[in-house]
């Protein structure tokens, strides 16, 4: 099925929806794995918003992230939601008074995000799946959120570096990554080995839901202990902020960092 191009959505004001064509991505064209990430989340888009409904399984994640943002960033500052999905966090942050730019590589996610933002409270952008440089000026944002993004990228250090570049001095980065302490991650480790076998690939062709799960296991490749993430962030000048203790342990770990220079700006 042909992919929808946001430039064809004439009912949406041009200022609200942009491609990164004026600042093309730097680096190679997206490889097979990047395309799988995009295709997986395009396929998930029709039912993704339901996960954030009051009884949805991701409601707690949204509450944790919005609470962390409120604790770290004043309401009137600029926020980049990197990997925004259908836009629940971006719209919540805009409702709190932040100036929000949200971007994703999955077109179907963005189509639904725009649809649920009729007043244009958020600036929505589509990223090239093979992006290596974010299409924003240096020191453009006071905060960046990357929720469940880093596990899918080839080079987390490079993404950390780009997040630092677009952050203003003292700016905050909030990200969630797989928490290896959680029992579901132990099971996924074993399942991911099986997911790469020819038998598993063949079974997935007959059961779309199973195929989606096996694809997820194959492309969620960045699974590390918290210390590894902190080291990678420190190498580019992002230093950890202690997160407040949360509720019951989640399969995701929230990590928070600040850009190293002028870190006392928000004190």
Image (cartoon, rainbow, N blue to C red):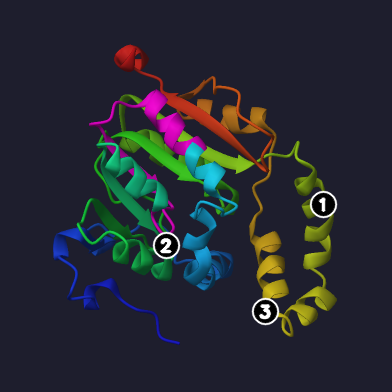
Q: What stretch is highlighted in magenta?
A: 64-87
- Give the quarter of the figure containing the N terminus: bottom left
Q: Which of marks 2 and 1 is nearer the N terminus?
A: 2
- Vertical relation: 212 (above or below) 132: below
Q: Which of marks 2 and 3 is nearer the N terminus?
A: 2
Q: Is residue 19 left or right of residue 54?
A: left
Mark 3 lies on residue: 208
Q: Between marks 2 and 3, how big is the CA–CA gap? A: 22 Å
- Vertical relation: 19 (above or below) 4: above
Q: Between marks 3 and 1, how big is the CA–CA gap? A: 21 Å
Mark 2 or mark 3, whichever is nearer to me = 3
Helix, strand or loop at mark 1: helix
Give coordinates of residue 245: x percent, y percent.
60, 23
- Give the quarter of the figure containing the C terminus: top left
**Residue 134 visible in rendering:** no
**Residue 31 visible in rendering:** yes
Q: Is residue 52 left or right of residue 245?
A: left
Residue at the image position 41 percent from the left and 24 percent from the top:
71
Q: Between marks 2 and 1, how big is the CA–CA gap? A: 28 Å
Find out whether the residues at labels 2 and 1 contact each other: C-beta distance under 8 Å.
no
Helix, strand or loop at mark 2: loop
Please identify the quarter of the rendering in which residue 243 is found: top right
Please identify the quarter of the rendering in which residue 112 is found: bottom left
Mark 1 lies on residue: 187
Mark 2 lies on residue: 105
Please identify the quarter of the rendering in which residue 74 is found: top left
**Front-most of 154 and 125?**
125
């Amino acid at each position: 099925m042909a992919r929808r191009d946001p430039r064809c959505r004439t009912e949406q004001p041009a200022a609200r929806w942009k491609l990164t064509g004026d600042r093309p991505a730097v680096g190679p064209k997206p490889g097979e794995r990047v395309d799988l990430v995009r295709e997986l989340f395009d396929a998930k888009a029709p039912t993704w918003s339901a996960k954030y409904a009051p009884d949805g399984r991701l409601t707690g994640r949204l509450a944790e992230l919005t609470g962390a943002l409120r604790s770290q960033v004043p309401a009137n500052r600029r926020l980049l939601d990197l990997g925004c999905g259908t836009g629940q966090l971006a719209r919540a942050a805009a409702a709190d008074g932040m100036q929000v730019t949200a971007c994703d590589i999955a077109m179907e996610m963005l189509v639904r995000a725009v649809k649920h933002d009729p007043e244009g409270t958020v600036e929505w952008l589509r990223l090239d799946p093979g992006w290596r440089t974010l299409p924003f000026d240096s020191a453009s944002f006071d905060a960046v959120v990357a929720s469940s993004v880093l596990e899918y990228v080839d080079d987390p250090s490079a993404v950390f570096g780009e997040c630092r570049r677009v952050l203003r001095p003292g700016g905050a980065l909030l990200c969630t990554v797989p928490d290896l302490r959680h029992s579901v991650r132990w099971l996924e480790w074993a399942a991911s080995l099986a997911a790469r076998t020819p038998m598993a690939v063949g079974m997935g062709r007959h059961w779309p839901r199973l195929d989606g799960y096996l694809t997820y296991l194959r492309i969620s490749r960045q699974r590390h202990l918290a210390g590894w993430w902190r080291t990678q962030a420190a190498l580019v000048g992002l230093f950890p902020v202690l997160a407040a203790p949360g509720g019951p342990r989640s399969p995701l770990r929230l990590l928070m960092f600040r850009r190293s220079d002028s870190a006392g700006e928000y004190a």
